Image: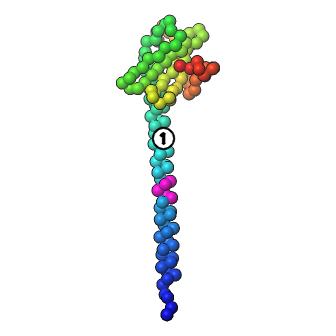
């Protein structure tokens, strides 16, 4: 007696096996992509919170005597710091609290207010050594 259909059954089983392996790999890639997307969203949120903290720093009154001073808004999770430099220039930092994300801007001091210098944006602390950064 000849067996018929066993090769067709083997092909069906092979197709099911290949399909399940492909679906498993596709699911893993999708999970990895979702993690990357979530990380990117956290980065973007922290960046804009740091930008908001920097803008908030322009509206604050700063001490005329302190060389380095920080102010914090716990309601929004912002922190803005001013570090005086030479003459009437200073470095204003906006930081998203609890994230480590910070942006800096060179500013000019006018009394208790700060005025942004043109082309003063900077996304890293320019001071050396890095320990001098607030």
Magenta part mainly helix, strand or loop?
helix
How packed mark 1 is, by other alpha carbons closer than 10 Å (few <14, some 14-19, many 20 or more), is few
Residue that carries the numbered disc 1 in the rendered image: 39
Question: Residue at position x 55%, y 12% from top?
Answer: 84
- Toward which corner of the image does residue 121 lie, by quadrant? top right
Question: Residue at position x 47%, y 9% from top?
Answer: 63
Image location (x, y in percent) of residue 116: 52, 18
Image location (x, y in percent) of residue 126: 60, 22
Question: Residue at position x 44%, y 17% from top?
Answer: 71
- Residue 121 appears in view: yes
Question: Residue at position x 49%, y 49% from top?
Answer: 33
Residue reaching furthest bottom?
1
Q: Is residue 91 magenta?
A: no
Image location (x, y in percent) of residue 87: 59, 8
Image location (x, y in percent) of residue 19: 48, 66
What are the residue bounds of the magenta stretch? 25-29
- Residue in the foreground of this view, choosing between 113 and 3: 3
């Amino acid at each position: 007696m000849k067996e018929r259909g066993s090769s067709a059954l083997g092909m069906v089983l092979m197709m099911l096996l290949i399909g399940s392996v492909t679906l498993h790999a596709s699911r893993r890639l999708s999970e990895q992509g979702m993690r990357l997307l979530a990380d990117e969203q956290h980065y973007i949120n922290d960046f804009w919170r740091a930008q908001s903290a920097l803008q908030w720093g322009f509206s604050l009154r700063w001490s005329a005597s302190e060389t380095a001073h920080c102010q914090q808004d716990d309601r929004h999770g912002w922190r803005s710091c001013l570090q005086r430099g030479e003459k009437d220039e200073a470095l204003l930092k906006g930081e998203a609290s609890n994230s480590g994300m910070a942006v800096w801007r060179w500013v000019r001091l006018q009394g208790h207010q700060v005025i942004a210098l043109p082309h003063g944006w900077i996304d890293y602390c320019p001071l050396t050594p890095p320990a001098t950064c607030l």
